[in-house]
Amino acid sequence: MKTGLHVPPIVETPATPEAGGVWHGRWASEADTEAFARQLAACPALAHATLALHGDLGAGKTTLVRHLLRALGVRGRIKSPTYAVVEPHSATNCPLMAPGEPLPIWHFDFYRFNDPREWEDAGFRELFATPGLKLVEWPERAGDFLPVIDLDIHIQPGDMTHTTPSDAEPDEARQVRMSARTATGRRLMSHMTP
């Protein structure tokens, strides 16, 4: 890829044909979402990955991000980037990093984009060119401008009333599907138990 002198290359894992692998799961409650986030946060490959979160409004994308950031050591308020488009975080005492080295994290939400060129105009190329974890909600709104995604996570409400324990709320149930696009994505998926 040719880049101009003023534009740093994007830090990404090269896409692999047939990156392969699909993982299916079910969350009966928010506690399951939290457990999934803790398991994902324990995988070393996450420190420099780009994850795309797919799902309708209210599917639980931001809830997953909040649990993931907490599991990585982010403290303080974790806001949704719906209006700001991006919220930066720094995970101190992150188990994936060397002692004293924080993990930079960027949480993007492109829901309000009307045109994929807004991604380029906003200067996000520079953020994606730096090391760290990138979490992207509504990635399709950035179109082809978005760099290679390592792992797609699709979340949708699921009717699991037949398997939901009586103390869980049926509207908390989610169907989850992950698909890897790169070797990093495959490492992340292989770390997860069904």
Image (cartoon, helix red, strand yellow):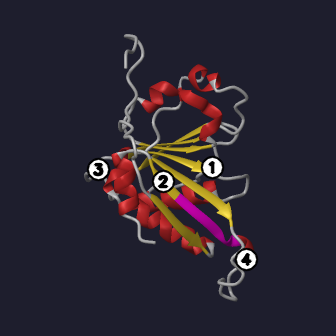
Which kind of residue does numbered mark 3 sit on? Gly
Q: Residue at x 66, y 83 (%)?
A: 164
Q: Is residue 139 above or below residue 68?
A: above
Q: Secondary structure at mark 3?
A: loop
Q: Amino acid at mark 4?
A: Pro
Residue 141 x %, y %: 65, 35
Gap in angstroms between the C-alphas marked 4 and 3: 42 Å
Mark 3–mark 1 CB contact (< 8 Å): no
Q: Mark 1 highlights which residue?
A: 79
Of the residues tagged 3 and 1, which is closer to the observer? 1
Q: Inspect this view and state whether residue 148 appears.
A: yes
Q: What residue is shown with label 3?
A: 100
Judging depth in this view, the residue of 32 and 154 nearest the camera is: 154
In x, y percent, where is residue 168? 68, 82
Q: Nearer the viewer, mark 4 or mark 3?
A: 4
For disc 2, the marked residue is: 179
Give the overall secondary structure of the magenta segment: strand
Mark closest to the chain's N terminus, 4 or 2: 4
Q: Nearer the viewer, mark 4 or mark 2?
A: 2
Q: Which of disc 2 and disc 1 is earlier in sequence?
A: 1
SS for callout 2? strand
Disc 1 marks a residue whose amino acid type is: Lys
